[in-house]
Image (cartoon, helix red, strand yellow):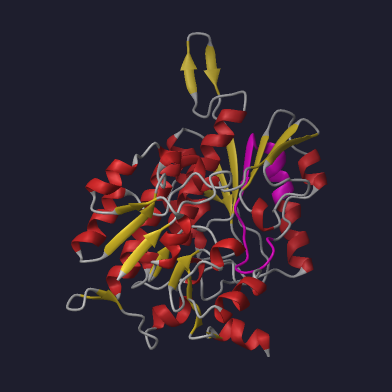
Amino acid sequence: MNIVIPKENSALELRVPMLPSVVEKLVKKGAKVLVESGLGETLDIKDEEYKKAGASIEKNRKKLFSAGDIVLRIRKPEAKDLSLLKKNAIHVSFLDPFNEKKLIDDMAKKNVSAISMEMIPRSTRAQKMDALSSQASLAGYAAVITAADNIQKIFPMMMTPAGTIQPCKVFIIGAGVAGLQAIATAKRLGAKVDAFDTRPVAKNDVLSLGAKFVEVDLGETGQTSQGYAKELTKEQLNKQREVMKQYCAQADVVITTAQLFGRKAPLIVTKDMVDAMKPGSVLVDLAVESGGNVEGSVAGKTVERSGVKIIGIKNMPAKVALNASLMYSNNLFNLLDEFWNKDSKQFELKLDDDIIQGCLITHAGKIVHPTFASAKK
């Protein structure tokens, strides 16, 4: 079974799908691994390191894809790559299936078995394969470091002969994987941290990290089966914003992490909330690529409003690309390892398994995932 790993478009992506240390583990399991020449160049990893791990190097991208029984990558395939895929190949990457209907249709027509990494179930068994969580955790860390680099003050309290410096006040909106890592990082840097989440179950997690949990009585809320916050009503959103406006006004740094699975991110921080913030403060919108939590945030840019920096970095995990690549590599390996037949040394696509049922979008010329198959009818 040939496992092929193509280069990502380096203009968009600094991470790599698999590091040499993880390639070596696949080779030891009996897989034949082919990587595109220059795969690790964004991380200064030479082809020679992949060779030492047991991989073959292929310079011709067309030959690489045509040899692939399994294709491993981070981003969804571009149209020119899709045409190169081998019939019945298994393609594993983030696919954004809710917003990429044409791509899903084309993959089905191509007879590709498409596994979408964002659709890995959030179950105990699948936790080691959960790339959304692994990348979100690093995004939360990187968001705090980015904020610290953009604000003109230090995070910790400091007592000096010249006087006492008060700690930076950080307000984190959303206490999912990214938010909790942001809280932990800000606390380690010495900041005073407040955090809010619509899900009551998040309170204990926030408190365990030493932050204050901001409580707003929104009535009935909750979370989806994937662990995401449910969408709020207009009345709940307005009530939430009233309280958050007070905390934003007091904060030096605000980090928003709220996302709705498969849908546009909710608008949480409005222009009047930004206007209420202190000049020189910083806003980091981690949801900017899915619509943004902050009114006026722009994907890929830092803009200023009323003296407040609004940072909308795309692909925040790539700010720590080496660690992000290692975690994603392990997510891919764990997925393959879970369904690896030791005797035949093959990856088995077990269609009756709950993990495969959760993340397999197309197979045998059809859209097989019930969510997207039903959308076609």
> Quadrant location of the C terminus?
bottom right
Tell me the magenta residue range: 244-265
156 on left or right of 173: left
254 part of magenta stretch: yes
> Quadrant location of the N terminus?
bottom left
Residue 314: x and y, percent? 61, 47
Residue 58: x and y, percent? 37, 53
56 part of magenta stretch: no
- Residue drawn at (56%, 68%) of the image: 83
Residue 141 drawn above or below residue 133 = above
309 on left or right of 117: right
Residue 68: x and y, percent? 39, 67
Residue in front for this viewpoint, 345 or 159? 345
The reply to whether residue 376 is in sight is yes
Image quadrant in which you'd find residue 322 = top left
250 on left or right of 28: right
Q: In this view, which residue lies farthest toward the top? A: 161
Residue 113: x and y, percent? 46, 77
